[in-house]
Image (cartoon, helix red, strand yellow):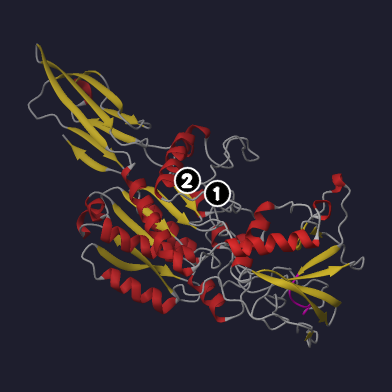
Amino acid sequence: MSVPIILTACAALAAPPAPIAPWSGQLDDAALDARLRAIDESPRATVTPLGTSRQGRPIPVVTLADSDAPAATRPAMLVVAGLDPLHQAGTEYAVRVAENLLASHAGLLDEVTIFVVPRLNPDGVAALRSGPIVDRRGNARTIDADRDGFTDEDGPQDLDGDGIVTMIRIANPPLSRPATHLPDPGEPRLMRTPDRDAGERATHAMLIEGVDLDGDGMIGEDGHGEVRLDRNFMHLFREHETESGPYPLSEPETLALAEFVIAHPTIIGAVVFGPHDTIVNLPETKKKDITGRTPIGIDEADLPIFKTLQSTYQDTVGQTRTGDDDDAGGLHAWLYAHRGIPTAAVTGWGRPDVPPPSEDDADAAAETADATESDADAPPAPKDAEAAGWLAWSDHLDGAGFVEWHAFEHPQLGAVEIGGWVPGFMLNPPARELDELARKQADFVAAFADLRPELAVEGPEFEDLGGGLARIRFAVRNDGTLPLRTAMSRTSDAIRPLAVRISTPRDSILQGRPLEFVDALPGSGGRADFDWVVRLGDTPTTITLDDPQFGVRTI
């Protein structure tokens, strides 16, 4: 059985020059490997395999600690990047975070272990770097996206030969492809859905650049690499969506990371670099899933934690603009909701302001505007101010982020236009800015770690009551800023509570219990008090604190 292939001979009328890839100047596999080898030479760093990708590429994890012995027993931070191949800047941030922590925050490593996974999806990155620039977000799994019995047989194509796959727009399309968009009157290069309440009407059909290779009437619907790793985790996993994968943790990359997290219960905080945001704009606290129990965003009781992280991020990074992606199936959502770990999902960079023109340029622009139009003839402001801002930033970079619409004779659709956004443009800063951006991200990771819970003890105090009886008073205090547990961890039973155990036999305890659990301990001095009256025996009495994140301590 064979897939019908349609002739794809196409003629571009006026193709623009090929744009520069948004990840130009960033780390390819060889450069990443070299940087990691240099990090591994530090006595405070080790680089080990986390796992391998679907195509067999190694996925490394960097462990930063003062020595190997306590690394697994001390509180730890997790930093992950490179789930989405379009967000290759995340790998740049993660590598530089490791380098900056070693160089500028070495003292932190005496107290906290830092795990850094710089590129979880090496297959997706390799595919993007070896072919045209395309909106590819997934790994190397092949999936029958259109459920026609074939896999990856009808993907997007670079029809005009400019090295990038953008969009096709069709003015006044036939009924078989209904119009869904119209050019923004304030900026005709931008396409948007109509505001029907304002009397607007769709005029154009929008399709991804390509042809119908399998004869099913659809274009570019079944390309290669459909499973997004940031859709493949358990929290709010969407079944029956191809980009989510056939089931949670179906991918070797996500499974390896989940097993690593579960094997390291000492992780008390995480930072995930990608297209998601939980810090510049705080997550939703009111909405629940269909059960009415699970928060779509975060538990309202955890809002103070995220406000603290937001304030810390602004103090260290200062990012005020960001995009945001759907959280369903995301790594950051799973870490928070299922593992109870406070997690900052950050894009690392937002839309910059276009530098003001020089006085000569401003004067010339004003004269041109005065000569060509009156205030009454001036076009309205674009309805999507954010998109217009990105377009202005692209124009400032000589069109690096947007392919101008140009006429094209499509072999199946006839006269169309090809153009639109360069995939990844809004996710990756210019390479010259990476050093400074990553230095700030390292400062944030260090500051986040400094907010961690810190368990201190008061006592024990011993009072002889006579008659072979004694009172023992004891307290556990949290001297850190963040609470010992998130509210979400208590809801989901993600982490076992702190156990406080006294060694006195149960039948010799007249007041108090031999085992107490502390499932919440507020930050900044929150405490739990214990008071036992015991019958003294011949053996010494011990008090043991047993916490999955902070280890075992015996007094």
The residue at which mark 2 appears reads as 336
| Image spot of residue 168 (x, y percent) | 77, 71
Image quadrant holding the N terminus, namely bottom right
What's the magenta bit mostly, secondary-structure-wise?
loop
Residue 108 in view in this figure:
yes
Q: Is residue 276 above or below residue 450?
A: below
Give the residue drawn at x 31%, y 44%: 450
| Image spot of residue 249 (x, y percent) | 52, 59
Q: Earlier in the sequence, mark 1 or mark 2?
A: 1
Q: Is residue 402 above or below residue 285?
A: below
The span picked out in magenta is 208-213
Mark drawn on residue 235 = 1
Other residues around mark 2 within 10 Å, as few (<14) / some (14–19) / many (≥20): many
Element at label 1? loop
Measured in 3D between alpha carbons, the distance from the residue under mark 1 to the one under mark 2, in whole angstroms, is: 9 Å
Q: Is residue 266 above or below residue 95?
A: above
Is residue 74 in the magenta section? no
